[in-house]
């Protein structure tokens, strides 16, 4: 039994083996958190992914008979938090299910229109006995239906997707896992899931401003109780688009020419003492690259022209980048081609569509870059380094 506070328990499931979460590679697995509150009335917060329904019910049964549950709060309709709905309702037939209007519509579309669910417009808060829960809609953090639940008596925020991490662990609290791994996974999670929704996350942070919070219990990963200040200030920094002096070079290469340019640019950036990460897309996943881009000032993308178009791995990365729209970046495009170019122009247009301010250059070379072309690439790297330091 995992206890957050007296009579408040974690009853979720740990998914040690998930490695792909709608296109985001989750190297360390995840968890689907659910919380049980025992008071004069009994409340359950969030379902779990369908394939983990039995784990959730088993954990509840370790504490109470599920048929005694009075309320089930659904903070978000995405199937990782709603999949166990039918099995739970069957196990807890008298429970009143509560969600936002948008969530009710979504749940009915996923699981059937016969579901009986109360809207938070009718019940914006519930009294459980000594404790209570208030519901705060946070639309688009993560879906339009999203909300968080707050327990003022214990100062616990049940934040659903916000402040989550895809991190499977035996410890359920932030002081039970390696803190650098935890912050790395919280960063990767924000970059891949919440980055394009920064306005909504900012609004959610504003809505919660001034509310005393002792503990943040998200729907993925560990519960924040020791490092609350650290994760909240990280979120404030991310929604503000704060960057650090860092560049990321992302490329793929057909016969090594674009790679030579990437390496020359890298040397130029490093010569200015700017932090740099380099990723060949043939060996790295888009979601790992995006995590490094979140706090970087500059993003440089390179690739060869293939059939008058962008190299497939670079095209995939650009589609991902465009969807996530990183804030406050400068960028540049480089590459190589044989007899007719095209990739650089298309890549530049995609980068601009992602909101990145481009630094113009002529680094697009026929077949193999020669010594002068590599020198020009090195000097361009230095220019990027200077721009980063002066930004
Ligand atoms: Fe963890 Fe938006 O679901």
Image (cartoon, grey):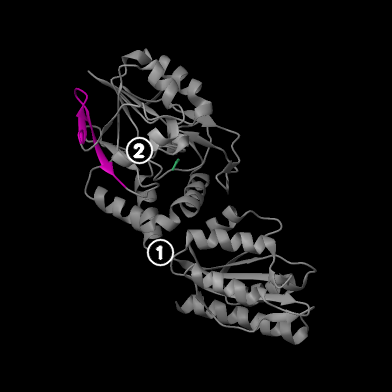
| Residue name at image x 47 percent, y 36 percent | 80
Q: Is residue 211 left or right of residue 282?
A: left
Which x, y percent locates residue 53?
48, 24
Q: Is residue 124 magenta?
A: yes
Q: CA distance from mark 1 to mark 2?
A: 33 Å
Ligand 1 is in which quadrant of the figure? top left
Q: In the image, residue 48 lies at what x, y percent?
A: 45, 30
Label 1 CB sits under 8 Å from any ligand 1 atom = no
Q: Residues within 10 Å of mark 1 (few under 14, many from 20)?
A: some
Q: Which residue occupies 50% across, 69% down?
A: 353
Task: Tell whether position 341 is magenta.
Answer: no
Q: Residue furthest bottom?
A: 372
Count of marks placed on residues: 2
Q: How far across and how far down the image is residue 252, in percent? A: 70, 65
Q: Categorize mark 2 by other alpha carbons within 10 Å: few (<14), some (14-19), many (20+).
A: some
- Specify whether residue 361 is in view: yes
Q: Is residue 118 left or right of residue 345?
A: left
Among the 4 quarters of the image, the one containing residue 347: bottom right
Quadrant location of residue 37? Answer: top left
Residue range corresponding to the magenta coloring: 122-138
Q: Quadrant of the C terminus?
A: bottom left
Position of 371 relative to 125 (above/below): below
**Residue 105's disc number:** 2
- Looking at the rendered structure, the secondary structure element under dot 2 is helix
Screen quadrant of the N terminus: top left
């Amino acid at each position: 039994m995992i206890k957050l506070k007296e009579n408040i328990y974690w009853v979720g499931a740990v998914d040690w083996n998930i490695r792909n979460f709608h296109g985001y590679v989750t190297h360390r697995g995840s968890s689907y958190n659910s919380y049980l509150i025992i008071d004069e009335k009994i409340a359950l917060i969030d379902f779990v992914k369908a394939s983990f329904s039995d784990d959730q019910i088993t954990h509840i049964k370790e504490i109470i008979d599920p048929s005694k549950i009075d309320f089930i709060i659904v903070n978000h309709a995405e199937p990782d938090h709603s999949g166990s709905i039918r099995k739970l309702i069957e196990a807890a037939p008298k429970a009143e299910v509560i969600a936002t209007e948008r969530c009710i519509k979504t749940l009915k579309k996923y699981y059937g229109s016969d579901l009986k669910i109360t809207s938070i417009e009718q019940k914006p808060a519930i009294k459980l006995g000594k404790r209570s829960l208030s519901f705060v809609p946070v639309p688009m953090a993560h879906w339009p239906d999203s909300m968080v639940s707050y327990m003022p008596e214990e100062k616990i925020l049940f934040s659903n997707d916000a402040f989550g991490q895809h991190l499977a662990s035996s410890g359920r609290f932030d002081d039970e896992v390696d803190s650098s791994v935890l912050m790395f996974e919280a960063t990767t999670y924000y970059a891949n899931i919440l980055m394009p929704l920064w306005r909504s996350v900012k609004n959610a942070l504003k809505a919660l401003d001034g509310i005393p919070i002792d503990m943040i219990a998200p729907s993925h990963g560990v519960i924040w109780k020791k490092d609350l200040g650290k994760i909240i200030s990280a979120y404030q920094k991310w929604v503000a688009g704060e960057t650090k002096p860092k560049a990321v070079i992302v490329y793929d290469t057909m016969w090594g020419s674009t790679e030579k340019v990437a390496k020359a640019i890298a040397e130029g950036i490093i010569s200015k003492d700017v932090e740099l990460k380099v990723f060949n897309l043939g060996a790295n996943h888009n979601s790992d690259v995006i995590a490094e881009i979140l706090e970087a000032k500059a993003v440089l993308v390179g690739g060869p022209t293939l059939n008058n178009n962008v190299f497939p791995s670079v095209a995939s990365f650009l589609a991902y980048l465009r969807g996530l729209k990183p804030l406050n970046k400068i960028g540049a495009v480089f590459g190589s081609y044989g007899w007719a170019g095209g990739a650089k122009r298309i890549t530049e247009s995609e980068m601009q569509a992602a909101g990145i301010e481009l630094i113009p250059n002529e680094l697009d070379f026929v077949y193999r870059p020669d010594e002068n072309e590599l020198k020009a690439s090195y000097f361009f790297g230095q220019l990027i380094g200077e721009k980063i330091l002066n930004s």
